[in-house]
Amino acid sequence: MWRAGCPANGHVRFGRRPEETHQWKHRQGASGRPHPIRVGPGPKSRKRYLLVACTSLLTCYFLGDRSMKTFGAFVFPDMDGVVVVHDRYQNYDKFPGVIHQLCCQHLLRDLADAAETYPGAHWPVQIREALQGLIHAANTARAQGLPAIPGDIAAPLIRAFRHGVILGLGQVKKIDGRKQNPCRDLLECLRDRQGDVLRFTTDLQIPPTSNQAERDVRPAKIQQKISGRLRSGQTTRHRYAIRGYISTAAKHGENVLTAIRGALAGNPWMPPVPDPP
């Protein structure tokens, strides 16, 4: 999938060597998301997006925008056969080899908004409770060492999820034209991509949310709140090359100062390459 950046020469490499891609392809359930930041001095600053790709052991950042050009320059072309946890942004779907897990945390937020938009409707509550029940069941089964949620537990929750979607589609009607009623696109997504929403229920190695990406992008959010912007695009790339390197080292239990010292000495720490399955 993705590879952590190494600051030894001030640049980031993104999974183009076979051993780099191999790092990610043996870690299913990676998360990815873009986060807006301001880059440049004063009134000349402009909005850019910091993309983060991560697992529990790897972190990689990339500065760009939300275009397909940026997504194509990041790690996604190397992701054949890899499960990626992400939100409903359309660019993730443009890479045919990627296996999708839609972030349930984002879906739960969308369902909470739907409940406010349609305060008398039961379907947002039914779908949300079913999804929350499945996440809880997945956590419980994972703690027990099971590979998937037991069928007798998953079946009634999935049935409630599906019936809630059907109920919602019946109440939020499709209309002619491109612009649809609020939440119609959410309901169609839940109907048409049920496999991508509930993939985590049959493989507990896959996380149901992209919370790992949220945690790894938090330093950028803090930086934004403190300074409001970063000085330049090049400085920002260097900053997050270093940040990806030390984040990956820390996830492996390495001492961050030791890893930085090794990089400055020309001998950067690198994550171990896993054995082929």
Image (cartoon, helix red, strand yellow):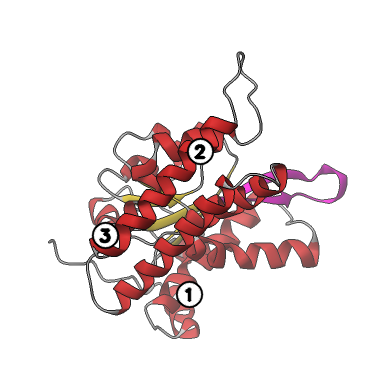
Determine which residue is flagged by label 1.
264
Mark 1 crowd level (few <14, some 14–19, many ≥20, 10 Å Cα): few
| Residue 225 relative to residue 162: left or right | right
Q: Nearer the viewer, mark 2 or mark 3?
A: 2
Tell me the distance, in whole angstroms, between the alpha carbons under discs 2 and 3: 28 Å
Q: Please provide percent x and percent y for residue 188.
A: 49, 33
- Which stretch appears magenta? 33-49
Determine which residue is flagged by label 3.
203
Mark with earlier residue (1, 2): 2
- Numbered label attached to residue 31: none
Quadrant of residue 205 within the rendered picture: bottom left
- Queried whether the magenta region covers residue 74, the answer comes back as no
| Residue 232 relative to residue 239: left or right | right
Q: Is residue 176 visible?
A: yes
Could you tell me which secondary element the residue under label 1 belongs to?
A: helix
Which amino acid, by three-letter code, is at mark 1? Leu
Quadrant containing the C terminus is bottom left
Tell me the distance, in whole angstroms, between the alpha carbons under discs 1 and 2: 60 Å
